[in-house]
């Protein structure tokens, strides 16, 4: 029963991989409509994990030739530039052994680190002018990139910052996702950016993936610091705290309605693997099961979304389904 369930998750991911292969050219590029960095963010990693190493390498070759700048970034502009695309491409490059791309990409990303708070800034390199915004999802993602690139001190600082995010929540009815240069959580939000600024469990379509990234990074950081048991325990405690926010009361039932629960499933599956607690695995599998049932016949999700969102979100869902299946 367990093997059959995990195989069904892999098969669901495989359907998306076949769709992605059909959507890309032999040189690794995507169709003209999707040939921009954001569409590629998690695609090389998905191809790598699915056993298509050659296609992954070709895609990275294309990205290096067409999109990567001399400073290492794959996207234009630094000011007001969300580093998440660069972060996932650096992680994918590192895991694929493309250190030529990952090294310069990480040299660019490490400049987003906030030296005082330990997290990472969302919109550009740390400026020192007092106007930086430190972001929970960015901190988790670039903290994970720091781990992959061997920068444990920056990863540890990011883990400390995530603990501050949890401890400084005035109440747990909502989760504030950004803090200012002084370390104060932002309490006012704008409509355009609100999904990156707060998680309100009472409202639909929240950014649950951000919480999944935080849990996943903290679990991996705990693994990396296993020889220092007090550090490992602290990171896992923070991961459990973020998980408790999701699992409180009937919140999880509302989480299941959101497509972005995919990243949360990955985080909970990692937490289950490390702690041995079956409840976390059960919740991860429930997320995976809902994703499996909602997949379209062509291997994609979100048929009513705009084409670019549908493309990106389909790749991400397939990636985390594959990770959940591998974690068991």
Image (spheres, rainbow, N blue to C red):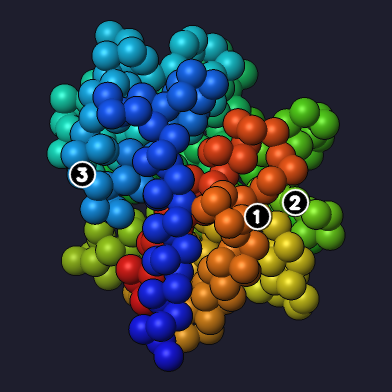
- Mark 1 and mark 3 lie on one chain; the one further toward the N terminus is 3
- Viewer-closest of 62 and 324: 62
Q: Residues within 10 Å of mark 2 (few under 14, many from 20)?
A: some
Whether residue 181 is situated above or below residue 291 in the rendered picture = above
Question: Which label lies toward us, 1 or 3?
Answer: 3
Q: Residues within 10 Å of mark 1 (few under 14, many from 20)?
A: many
- Viewer-closest of 105 and 155: 105
Q: What residue sits 62% from the left and 68% below the top? A: 293
Residue 228 figure quarter: bottom left
- Do tag 1 and tag 2 residues touch (Cβ < 8 Å)? yes
**281 left or right, relative to 289:** left
The spot of residue 233 in percent (x, y) is: 37, 70
Query: Mark 1 sits on what residue?
Result: 259
The spot of residue 304 in percent (x, y) is: 74, 43
Secondary structure category for the residue under label 3: helix
The spot of residue 247 in percent (x, y) is: 66, 73
Query: Mark 3 sits on what residue?
Result: 53
- Viewer-closest of 173 and 130: 173
Q: CA distance from mark 1 to mark 3?
A: 28 Å
């Amino acid at each position: 029963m367990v093997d059959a369930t995990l195989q069904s998750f892999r098969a669901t991911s495989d359907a998306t991989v076949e769709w992605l292969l059909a959507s890309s050219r032999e040189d690794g590029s995507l169709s003209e409509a999707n040939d921009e960095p954001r569409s590629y963010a998690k695609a090389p990693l998905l191809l790598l994990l699915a056993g298509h190493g050659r296609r992954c390498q070709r895609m990275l070759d294309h990205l290096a030739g067409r999109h990567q700048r001399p400073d290492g970034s794959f996207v234009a502009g630094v000011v007001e530039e969300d580093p998440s695309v660069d972060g996932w491409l650096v992680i994918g490059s590192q895991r694929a052994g493309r250190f030529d791309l990952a090294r310069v990409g990480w040299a660019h990303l490490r400049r987003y680190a906030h030296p005082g708070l330990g997290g990472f800034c969302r919109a550009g390199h740390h400026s020192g002018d007092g106007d930086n915004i430190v972001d929970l999802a960015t901190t988790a993602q670039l903290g994970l990139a720091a781990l992959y690139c061997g920068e444990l001190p920056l990863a540890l600082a990011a883990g400390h910052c995530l603990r501050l995010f949890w401890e400084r929540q005035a109440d747990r009815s909502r989760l504030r996702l950004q803090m200012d240069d002084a370390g104060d959580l932002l309490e006012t939000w704008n409509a355009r950016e609100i999904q990156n600024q707060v998680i309100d469990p009472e409202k639909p379509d929240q950014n649950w993936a951000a919480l999944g990234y935080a849990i996943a990074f903290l679990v991996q950081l705990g693994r990396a610091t296993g020889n220092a048991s007090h550090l490992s325990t602290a990171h896992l405690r923070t991961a459990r705290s973020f998980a408790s926010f999701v699992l409180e009361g009937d919140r999880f039932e509302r989480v299941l309605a959101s497509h972005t629960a995919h990243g949360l499933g990955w985080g909970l599956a990692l937490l289950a693997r490390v702690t041995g607690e079956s409840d976390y695995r059960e919740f991860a599998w429930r997320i995976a099961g809902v994703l499996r049932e909602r997949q379209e016949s062509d291997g994609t999700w979100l048929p009513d979304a705009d084409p670019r969102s549908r493309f990106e979100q389909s790749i991400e869902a397939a990636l985390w389904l594959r990770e959940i299946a591998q974690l068991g």
